[in-house]
Amino acid sequence: MFTLVALSTMGILFSCKKDETGTVTLQSKQVKDLQADTIIGVYTSGPATGQPYGSGKFTFYSLETNSLIANSDSATNKWDIGLRGTTIITNGGNSGPASGGAFVYVGTFDDLKSVPADSVFRIDNAPTSYAIRTGSGNGWYSYNGATNIITPIPGRILVIRTASGKYAKIEIQNYYKGGVTPDASASDEDKLKKQRYYTFRFIYQSSGSKNF
Amino acid sequence: MKYFLLTFVFYNFCFPAFSQTDSSKLLDEVIITATRTERKLGNVAVPVQLINSKIIQQSGSVRLNDILQEQTGLFITSGGATTSAGGGVFGNGVQIQGLSPDYTLILLDGEPIIGRQGGILDLSRLTVGNIKKVEIVKGPSSSLYGSEAMGGVVNIITEQSQQDKLTASLRYGRFNSTDADLTAAIKRNKWGLQLFGNRNSSDGFDLDKSTPEKTVDPFRNYTSQLRFNFWPTTKTKISLSARYFNEIQKNFFPVKDIATGNDINITGDGRIRDRNINPVITQTFNNNLKSSLRFYFSRYEYEQKLEKQVEQDLYYYDFFQQDFFRVENQTDWQWQKNNYLSIGGGLVEERLNTTRYAGKRSNNVRYGFIQDEWKNDKLTVIGGLRYDNNTAYKSKLSPKLAAQYKLNNKFRINASYGAGFKAPDFRQLFLNFLNTAAGGYVVYGANEITIDELQVQKQQGVIIEILPKAYQLALLKPETSKGINVGADYNVNPKLNFKINFFRNDIDNLIQVDIIAYRSNNAPVYSYFNVLKAFTEGAELQAQYVLNKYIQLQGGYQYLITADKNDLQKIKDGTVFTRDLQSGAVTKMHRSEYAGLPNRSAHMVNTKLFYDNSSTGWSGSLRAIYRSRWGTYDKDGNGVINRSDEFAKGFVMLNIAAAKTIHDFKIQVGIDNLFNYKDELNLPAQPGIQPYISLAYSFITNHK
């Protein structure tokens, strides 16, 4: 049910980039409004009263096929990344059966033309340590405690080793529905309802090369 | 710019020329805060500013923030170092030389006012009805005053009975705001008594009519103050002052019921009580030796009790009580013809009792200071040193060196170096807080947790992971600043005076919260560390011109640059990027795009005209202040202020007042914020245009 909702509201855009010699290079693809455990309610009792919650499930995505993967396939090699709230997992370590990994590159999407030779891919060791570090300012996002807004840090590129051992680079562009960050003055309700909708672009290198 | 032109046209249009008086007299005014001894303003080597009661009256000010906001280089702000979009919750604090209100010491007759909320001391707690003058010292001054005197010191000097007096005044303005003063004074040969009472109230105001709650809720407060002076002999002075402040604010706002989604109205009172008592004995032994013994006790209480309006169930309760007790001696000794020595020391006991921590907490500080001033006809040199020692955080030594050189009777050069510090506050030391409502995170004050205790918690299974940062847990150091001021005063002629001052403050060991561990429910555990470094630098220019015996013009400008040094390093390393507002394109950020610390304006200007004609009984003032845009908060996720949508718009505010005195009766009308400037998001404490009228009557005619 959850993945169905995600599919129906997700749009996929393509863009082509030509290099200087005019030959078509790798395509950058954009994924819009990918729902990652969107908020379905707020606890009304217990120690977490007032805290929002979702279904608690990861949304799995295949960069290779540019498509959503059913949650029931979580123990397969079909997916490359999983998203739940601000947490992004890779298909490896204790998150999945493949030997995927990731690290965060500091620079622009276009600047990252190849995975540097000395790069160290990190492996998930949930819940204490993830390949893509969790927490504000540690990985891909920053959280403003005064406005309760989550913003992707510009110049942070997720370099992914996919389930099949290929490489991809991802730039998270927005965390809110429609790719529009709410105003600081928006209601808390609005900020909660619209969050956990990822807009990102990525390049998947199917050849196995580290060059993008 | 248009507004300034307008102002100048107005000046010329309204007031034809008169004849002259002398402005160099201003330099003869006495200031005590700069050296803790009485000195002429023109002989002080550090940057100072003096506001006398006449200026306060001509400006129609009622609270301290009203008058401070019109001074060069001072900015009244409702947010701390990291102001949020919905600021304003902590009242009106003052920023000096670009340092946050947290780092400004506020004194009342030389004794510290306590009771900060979120680091900010709300200046609207202080009435100006009984103020004789306000002295402002800019730059670090901890060599004399200890903690908090990092950005500067504001010392409010209250009126003392000089003659028999009975006056009353009443002011009424927009939002049903009222301010009433009653002053009674008796002066006899050997004693004097001054009594003062003030009532201040307002219906509050609402900048956003679409919401049921007001921007500022209705409030009323009372201030009463007593000052008794007694001279048993010509060489002994005994004084006693006591003050009591009491405020009630009527809160009303709706919250969403989580279960039903309906609004629940919350009502209740926020209450502040602030009392202090200050006995002082001063003995003059001979012309060269004077000593004073000061006692000071202050208690600040804040209590907020909120209920659900319909059910009358308790919704929120907060109680905060802070006690401050100090005993201090200061001895001033002119030990050589050209050498003035001040030696002092004291003890401070501070106690805290609040619902926010587990139990009561206290801290003691012992301190001593020494200052020597050497001078000849041309040169004055002052050196000073203060040592603050305590148990809860690292001790601190604060030096100062200042010099003034008089080239001739028109031109003076000042230079000073000073150190400032701010002690870690009780929250940073002693907080022990488990948030059960929001995810179960824990915050420990630096003195409440050790790495050993964390390891015990890990063995018990309370904690699942200890982060490397936890191994850096240590006794907190005070936040420190080192300031350099270099400036000059130039009296072009008896009517015209210029002052310029260049400043640089390097701020170190700023305290920040960081994650030290994760609990078994994955919630973080926080504690405090000395990590951040920043600087502020700039220049200040002031001019004063006595046009004639009725009209005086004043102008001031401050240029300010600030930066978080860690951010600067990241920008230099090339790891800071920005996302274009329109295209969303990400590019590397350049140093030139970096706007420094939030809530600072690069340019601040004031121009003021004061008119006073005692023969006709007319007086008045026209004051314009300008503040250029300032950074609010990061929106593109890079953690720094750089993009155009991360700024609040600059503004011009114009305030006017006119008064007519007829015998013992005075009527004043004025309009504050004539252009009706408002910015709900960034300056929520500014309600817009405020016309007012006030009446004052003196029951006893003064005989000079």
Image (cartoon, rainbow, N blue to C red):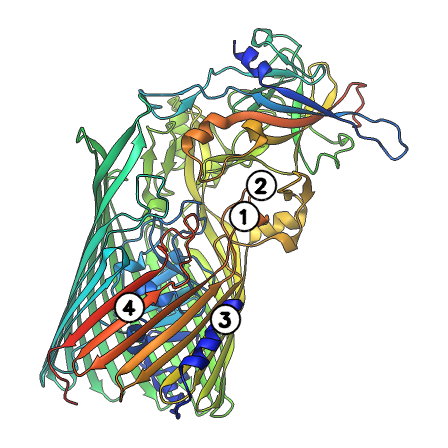
- Establish whether labels 3 and 1 are both on one chain: yes
Subunit bearing disc 4: B
Q: Residue B250 vs residue A61: left or right?
A: left
Residue behind mark 2? B636
Does the CB distance between marks 2 and 1 fall below 8 Å?
yes
Q: Earlier in the sequence, mark 3 or mark 4?
A: 3
Residue behind mark 1? B646
Would residue B44 be visible to someone looking at this image? no
Three-letter amino acid code of the residue under disc 1: Glu
Q: Earlier in the sequence, mark 3 or mark 1?
A: 3
Does the CB distance between marks 1 and 4 fall below 8 Å?
no
Subunit bearing disc 2: B
Q: Nearer the viewer, mark 3 or mark 1?
A: 3
Residue B146, position in %: x, y?
35, 63
Does the CB distance between marks 3 and 1 fall below 8 Å?
no
Q: Nearer the viewer, mark 2 or mark 3?
A: 3
Residue behind mark 3? B4
- Establish whether labels 1 and 4 are both on one chain: yes
